[in-house]
Amino acid sequence: MKNWKRIGKDKKYKFKYRQMINRSFKTPDGRIYDFDLMTGLDVVCIFALTQDNKVVLARQFRPGPELALDELPGGKID
């Protein structure tokens, strides 16, 4: 997976109790996506193993570090 290119400048704003940062990215095939990044969230990740003890990872583009990363599956704690 190729990395995406950040375009434009960050837009910062507040939403309820969290600070938000909006970033725009261009994919290798030319599509443009906007992302809202939140700061200060409580999150969890899962260390999942297959029956033959292989670790399950998810590969996805992360707008914060601006890279495609292999990471443990996880998300926000509700």
Image: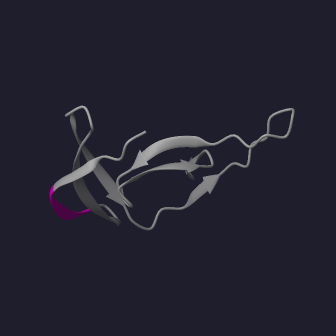
The residue sitting at 80% across, 34% down in the picture is: 50
Of residue 40 and residue 72, the one placed in the foreground of this image is 72
Determine whether, in the image, residue 30 is placed left or right of residue 54.
Answer: left
User: Residue 72: horizontal and vertical position, in percent?
Assistant: 63, 49
Residue 20 included in the magenta stretch of the image: no
40 up-or-down from 29: above or below:
below
Q: Residue furthest right?
A: 52
Image height of 29 relative to 18, above or below: above
Q: Which residues are magenta?
A: 8-14
Total marks shown come to 0
Q: Position of residue 54 (x, y in %)?
A: 78, 40
Residue 12 is a magenta residue:
yes
| Rendered position, 60 above or below 45 | above
42 is higher (above) or lower (below) than 35: below
Helix, strand or loop for the magenta stretch, by majority: strand
Instruction: Please give the name of the residue rendered at 29% of the width and 61% of the height, measured from the top-left corner.
Output: 20
Using the image as rendered, state which of residue 16 and residue 66 is in the foreground. 66
* Whole-percent x, y for residue 35 in the image: 28, 48
